[in-house]
């Protein structure tokens, strides 16, 4: 046997030379046996715009150190990925004998993607392959969505209409949305996000934001239905939402007097009848108007009538108020608040009432003064000579 080996000894250098001409990958194939890839979740369902974090082990079951390139093959177009081990981006891993090395694969599913099954694989050089499957659960889009559960409200022209809306950035990119509205003259529209008034919103990809839209019509707006388009837009994408405001008319009334004078005089303990003018200066009917008052203690006010069932727009009705002052009121000025009130609106008129004392008390005062003078005169006459 030894003799046979010696006979081929001159050919050993030639054999090693021929082996050196073989590609390096052939050596890798010969010596890299025992490498394998493992992940517990090879098949995952994911909506458009999401991302998947795979934890993958490169296992070396051989008795030698193994080094292999790590790559992702067959990933669909527009999908992206990151390969990391610890905090490092990796393209190659080396594993000690009978050990394993963990790395992570993050796959980003684009927003614009079709619903279906997508296959790709993680490759450890030419020696190990890990097939992965992603089930995209729904048809993806590349747009902005602007929605609201309720887009119609009705009320008076001087009411504030508050709508709740949701803005969704489904573009897959960060966006800054400008918020605008098309309104009629005299109208005002404001936007609030997180309780603060805003005119634009900065949103990351695949984010939703709740927005409050406050619509304040002109107080003089006539009854009718009005459309208010609202737009959220960037340079690349936009979405609009249309609200409807149904104006039932405006509630407005004025309580005063025919002459405009809001003062009167009254004697303590007596009554004073004053004429009031109540006007519906709005564009909606006023119903069940009640007359109320606020006066000093022990004063009273009686209205005629005390309740007005209906007052048409731009109509005026006369109301009489009988003011009774306290009989013990001293002379001076007093304020009496007269009010016309409905469930929707109210109007007040402040009356200045000047109280005068009764003539009887005046004459009594004079008699008391003269009596006091007479007493003094009598005392002087009687005791002045002593």
Image (tube, grey):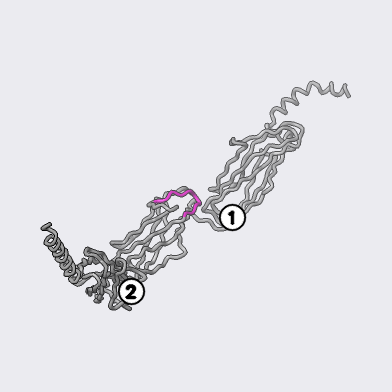
Residue of label 2: 290
Q: Which residues are magenta?
A: 200-209
Q: Residue furthest front?
A: 386
- Reply above or below: 89 against 74: above
Tell me which corner region of the image, top left, top right, bottom left or bottom right, holds residue 312.
bottom left
How busy is the neighbourhood of tag 2: few (under 14 within 10 Å), some, or many (20 plus)?
some
Report the Cα–Cα distance between label 2 and label 1: 65 Å
Tell me which corner region of the image, top left, top right, bottom left or bottom right, holds residue 367.
bottom left
Residue visible at 38% across and 63% down in the picture: 161
The one of 230 and 361 positioned closer to us in this rendering: 361
Residue of label 1: 136
Quadrant placement of the C terminus: bottom left
Q: What is the x, y in percent for residue 85?
A: 62, 37
The one of 170 and 217 positioned closer to us in this rendering: 217
The one of 311 and 137 positioned closer to us in this rendering: 311
Residue visible at 38% across and 60% down in the picture: 214
Q: What is the x, y in percent for residue 159?
A: 35, 65
Residue visible at 89% across and 24% down in the picture: 1
In the image, is residue 202 part of the stretch drawn in magenta? yes
Q: What is the x, y in percent for residue 373?
A: 14, 63
Q: Secondary structure at mark 1?
A: strand
In the image, is residue 296 part of the stretch drawn in magenta? no
Residue visible at 46% across and 58% down in the picture: 166
| Number of marks drawn | 2
Q: For residue 336, say whether it is visible.
A: yes
The one of 238 and 187 positioned closer to us in this rendering: 187
How busy is the neighbourhood of tag 1: few (under 14 within 10 Å), some, or many (20 plus)?
many
Q: Secondary structure at mark 2?
A: strand
Q: For residue 221, say whether it is visible.
A: no
């Amino acid at each position: 046997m030894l003799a046979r080996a010696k006979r081929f000894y001159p050919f050993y250098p030639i054999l090693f030379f021929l082996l050196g001409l073989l590609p390096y990958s052939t050596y890798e194939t010969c010596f890299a046996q025992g490498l394998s890839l493992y992940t517990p979740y090879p098949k995952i369902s994911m909506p458009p715009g999401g991302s998947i974090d795979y934890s993958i082990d490169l296992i070396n079951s051989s008795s030698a150190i193994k080094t292999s390139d790590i790559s992702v093959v067959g990933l669909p177009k527009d999908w992206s990925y990151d390969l990391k081990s610890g905090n490092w981006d990796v393209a190659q891993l080396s594993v000690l004998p009978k050990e394993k090395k963990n790395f992570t694969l993050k796959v980003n599913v684009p927003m614009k993607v079709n619903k279906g099954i997508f296959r790709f694989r993680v490759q450890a050089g030419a020696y190990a392959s890990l097939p992965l499957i992603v089930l995209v659960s729904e048809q993806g889009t590349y747009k902005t969505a602007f929605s609201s559960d309720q887009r119609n409200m009705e009320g008076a022209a001087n009411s504030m209409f508050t709508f709740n809306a949701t803005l969704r950035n489904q573009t897959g990119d960060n966006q800054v949305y400008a918020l605008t509205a098309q309104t009629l003259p005299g109208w005002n529209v404001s936007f609030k996000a997180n309780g603060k008034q805003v005119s634009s919103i900065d949103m990351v990809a695949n984010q939703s934001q709740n927005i409050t839209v406050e619509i304040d019509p002109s107080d003089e707006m006539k009854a009718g239905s009005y459309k208010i388009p609202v737009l959220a837009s960037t340079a690349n994408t936009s979405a609009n939402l249309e609200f409807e405001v149904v104006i039932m008319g405006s509630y407005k009334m004025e309580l005063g007097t025919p002459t405009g004078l809001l003062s009167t005089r009254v004697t303590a303990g007596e009554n004073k009848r004053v004429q009031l003018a109540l006007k519906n200066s709005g564009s909606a009917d006023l119903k069940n108007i009640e007359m109320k008052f606020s006066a000093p203690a022990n004063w009273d006010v009686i209205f005629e009538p005390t309740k007005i069932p209906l007052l048409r727009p731009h109509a005026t009705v006369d109301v009489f108020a009988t003011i009774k002052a306290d009989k013990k009121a001293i002379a001076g000025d007093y304020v009496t608040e007269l009010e016309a009130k409905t469930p929707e609106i109210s109007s007040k008129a402040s009356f200045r009432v000047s109280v005068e004392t009764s003539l009887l008390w005046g004459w009594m005062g004079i008699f008391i003064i003269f009596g006091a003078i007479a007493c003094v005169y009598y005392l002087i006459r009687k005791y002045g000579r002593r």
